Amino acid sequence: MAKNLDVIMLFDIYGEMLTKKQQDFIGYYYNDDLSLAEIAENEGITRQGVRDAIKRAEAQLLDFEAHLGLKRRFDDMKNGLDEIEQLTEVIKEINRSTVLSREINDATTRIGVITQMLRE
């Protein structure tokens, strides 16, 4: 079974909305990197049972994202912050090579501080 890396992020966002057993199985499989057989042995169920439980949990996580869109919003915000930082560097460079305005320098520095704060 191929691992869907988006599931890790979705699990971080929506994991608390899953049942305890689903949380455990997703955690074992994605975070602890246990195989389906290892999880099955530890939990006393079949490998197919583990696979089905993980597939159901993944489907629920994808459904939560489809309805709530928190990961998409997070990605959009991250991309926006990246673009703001790039444009801030362009403005700083133009300021250095032309006007050398203290106000522009102070404003771009403040923008950099705010973007870093929003990333944390």
Image (spheres, rainbow, N blue to C red):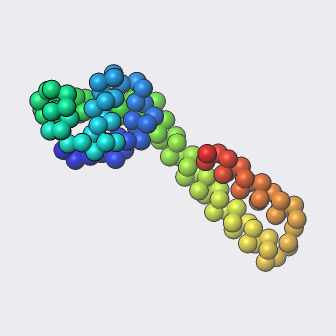
Left or right for 33, reference 67: left
| Above/below status of 91 relative to 4 | below
Q: Percent position (x, y) of residue 77?
A: 57, 46
Q: Percent position (x, y) of residue 50?
A: 18, 31
- Dividing the picture into quadrants, the one containing residue 23 is top left
- Dividing the picture into quadrants, the one containing residue 16 is top left
Q: Percent position (x, y) of residue 100?
A: 85, 72
In terms of depth relative to the viewer, which is nearer, 63 or 110? 110
Residue at 77% across, 59% down: 109
Left or right for 102, reference 47: right
| Above/below status of 2 relative to 48 | below
| Above/below status of 88 relative to 79 | below
Residue at 80% across, 70% down: 95
| Above/below status of 69 relative to 85 | above
> Residue lying furthest top in this view?
19
In terms of depth relative to the viewer, which is nearer, 16 or 108? 16
> Residue lying furthest bottom in this view?
97
Residue at 14% across, 38% down: 37
